Image (cartoon, rainbow, N blue to C red):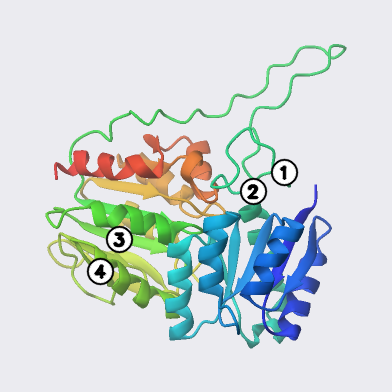
Amino acid sequence: MTIRILVVDDSPFMRKSLQKMLEEAPDLRVIATARDGIDALEKIQEHKPDIVTLDIEMPRMDGLTCLKKIMADHPIPVLMVSSLTQEGAQATLDALSLGALDFIPKESGFASLSILQIQHDLQEKVRRLATSPRFHKTGSTSPAAPAHAPMTPPPPPASAPPKAPAAPKAAPPSGTSLGSPQAELLLIGSSTGGPKALQDILPTIPASLPVACLIVQHMPSTFTKPFADRLNGICQVHVKEAEQGEPLKAGTVYIAPGGIHMTYGARGPKGCIELSAEPVSSLHRPSVDVLFLSVAELFRGQVLAGILTGMGADGAKGMEQLKRKGAHTLAESEESCVVYGMPRAAVERGCVDVVAPLGEIPGHLRRHFHI
């Protein structure tokens, strides 16, 4: 079925550009456009779209004020269209805290050579967010076939000879223990929906966390430091953007900088941060897989690795390698994910010990580390 979209932007050029990029996909249709927040709220009531793309800087009513009203009165998936400036980063992080599911960068890039990549990202995010489990619980109807369609094929027709379908690898129950011995390093990977998930999890961790925590969250380079600073202001543990060569310290959370890979380095008593542009062929930079694989190769102690909400499969390959080395592994369950992509990919590889909704993950971590 077709996904129905409301595009909100004060620029006629941007409204037209977004509409054109979206409607080149046969399953996406812009049913209306709006020039500001007041116009958007009226159009939402009139057209009842499946998803809204929302600008931040607009006259009469800005995007953040509009977003608050949408979440209070008409809760539907919202994709922010945001500037990559420092101010844009802060406003976008505010939007994600208020209920927006993700963002797409609004730059001169809409008229640049990267237009095809921008268009692909925009279309994919609209598809995935419009069918997000956050707004469409498993088993409910949704505007398009969800990314988390049932893995077990339907039974064959009566006339066909019986054929046993290949059984998918079952997800372990959420009550499963993360096991022992206690890990000496904590790793987390996330993407779409990750900023809000991390903002829910990290403040629950006491300052007495006995290990360092390395986090890869897919974000532009201008976003990661403001994001780390924001988390540091609400957490008991120390949260910072990772820097090249710095030694790992217990009770500190290191956020990978945008645009560069973060890996584990074996120098020093507890290891250190290494930052590199390699591999340049990686789909994401920073990449969860690149971090996880470096730890699997170089770290000699016990590891606890988690994958939270996100599009795609980044992290699954690395988690599989970590599991082969004896790591404890955890994945967010479909019911709380914004997009059940990255965790599902790991579950399907059979390398996850515990699958749990976001609200239960802090308890698993506190019990494992006895904090």
Evaluate if marks 4 and 2 touch, with contact meaning CB atoms under 8 Å apart.
Answer: no
Q: Residue at x 64, y 48 (%)?
A: 131
User: How far is the residue under mark 4 from the one under mark 2?
Assistant: 32 Å
Q: Would you place residue 159 above or below residue 124 in this image?
A: above
Q: Nearer the viewer, mark 3 or mark 2?
A: 2
Q: Would you name the residue on which mark 4 appears?
A: 232
Which of pointers 3 and 4 lies earlier in the amino acid sequence? 3
Q: Would you name the residue on which mark 2 appears?
A: 131
Amino acid under disc 3: Leu
Q: Quadrant of residue 272?
A: bottom left
Q: Would you name the residue on which mark 1 appears?
A: 145
Let me know if residue 341 appears in the view.
Answer: yes
Instruction: Give the camera-side residue of 319 and 299.
Output: 319
User: How far is the residue under mark 3 from the one under mark 4?
Assistant: 14 Å
Instruction: Give the camera-side residue of 83 and 182.
Output: 83
Q: Would you name the residue on which mark 3 appears?
A: 214
User: How far is the residue under mark 3 from the one under mark 2?
Assistant: 30 Å
Amino acid under disc 2: Thr
Disc 3 crowd rating (10 Å Cα; few below 14, some 14-19, many 20+) is many
